[in-house]
Image (cartoon, rainbow, N blue to C red):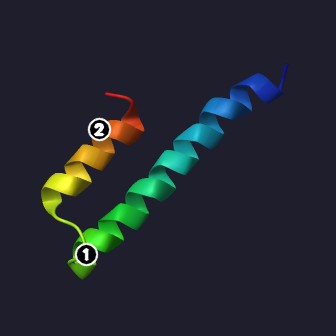
Amino acid sequence: MAAAPAEPAAAGAGTADGLKKFKDLLDSGVITQEELDAKKKELSGL
């Protein structure tokens, strides 16, 4: 049963890592704020 609570935490960590990568791309001028916002919605499941 211990594995079940670890899965959402791992998914959350993956989402945070993904958002950080996209934020870095925004800061570098590779993507726009609108693209970052769209990715946030996609990763958060909205």
Identify which residue is drawn at 42% across, 65% down: 21
* Picture residue at 56% right of the left edge, 48% below the top: 13
Q: Quadrant of the C terminus?
A: top left
The amino acid type found where label 1 is placed reads: Val
Q: Do the CB atoms of the residues marked 2 and 1 lie less than 8 Å apart?
A: no
- Which residue is label 2 attached to? 41
Q: What is the number of the mark on residue 19?
A: none
Amino acid marked by disc 2: Lys
Q: Most extreme residue toward the bottom, as rendered?
A: 28
Left or right: 3 with respect to 28?
right
- Residue 24 placement (x, y as % from top left): 34, 72
Marked residue nearer the N-terminal end (2 or 1): 1
**In the structure shown, which secondary structural element does the residue marked by tag 2 occupy?**
helix
Closer to the camera, 17 or 2?
17
Measured as percent of width and height from the top left, residue 32 is found at 16, 64
Query: Badge 1 is on which residue?
Result: 30
